[in-house]
Image (cartoon, rainbow, N blue to C red):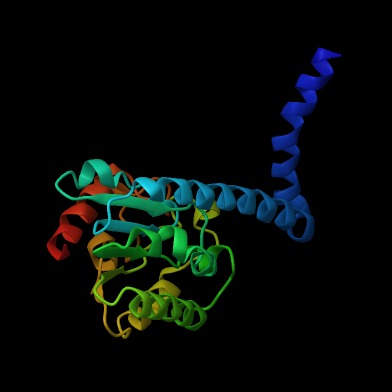
Amino acid sequence: MEYIIVILILLIPISGYFLYKYGKKAGADWLLNLLFKSGFDAKVAGFKKQNSFVKKGGIVFVGDSITQDYNVYEYFPEYKVYNRGIGGDTTEGLLKRLDESIFELEPKTIVLLMGTNDFGVLNANPEDIYLRMKEIIGKIQNRLIDTKTILISIYPVNPKLDPTSVGSRNNSNIKKLNSLYQTIQGIQYVDLYNLLIDEEGNLKKEYSVEGLHINQNGYEIITNEIKKYL
């Protein structure tokens, strides 16, 4: 009986993988969305608890997994920093968690990086992502009139390293979105896209984990650039 239970436990992630790879869409997407929502809700609830310990007037980094994996506490030891990144999040998700991720912290500065998952998860176009980001920044400006918002360009991808991880994202759409981001008023836009590309216009492999996420070499370059604007 114990062996049967162990086998069943092992089959859950395996069946989920094949469901997504071969069964695709309806059932697989429903399962993945359910798992993400559970993790998303848990992270937001955790932020809510942590915010009672936050010192107002700090710097909050807000974003998806690229921010979540960014060890800002060690990269910015001279600053009062907080990380509010959630892996897999989109501009739609951020609109739902502005209180827990930004407003309750009453930060002096916001470093905002969001949008790549809108391409990969929502299959959104650059114009729709731009409009949601503009809405997010408008809400921030209305609520925190003295807060500086630093909007980071979406990072390039490198499909040559791992096409599965990169998914439907492409640098053409990312560049279009970055061009739109630059038009948003009242922010400090920081172009890291061109800092991270290779001679072919892809994310440099020496800065990347698998073509989408950033390794420590990349974070070091990013940190040195962001510090210029703090």
Residue at horizontal 44 percent and vertical 52 percent from the top: 65
Screen quadrant of the C terminus: bottom left
**Farthest residue toward the front?**
52
Q: Left or right: 125 with respect to 78?
A: right
Residue at horizontal 29 percent and vertical 64 percent from the top: 110
Q: Left or right: 12 with respect to 83?
A: right
**Toward the viewer: 56 or 217?**
56
Residue 102 on image: x %, y %: 38, 62
**Farthest residue toward the top?**
2
**Toward the viewer: 217 or 171?**
217
Screen quadrant of the N terminus: top right
Q: Can residue 157 be seen in this view?
A: no
Residue 177 on image: x %, y %: 40, 77
Residue 216 on image: x %, y %: 28, 43
Residue 143 on image: x %, y %: 37, 75
Residue at horizontal 72 percent and vertical 43 percent from the top: 16
Task: Classify residue 7 by image quadrant.
Answer: top right
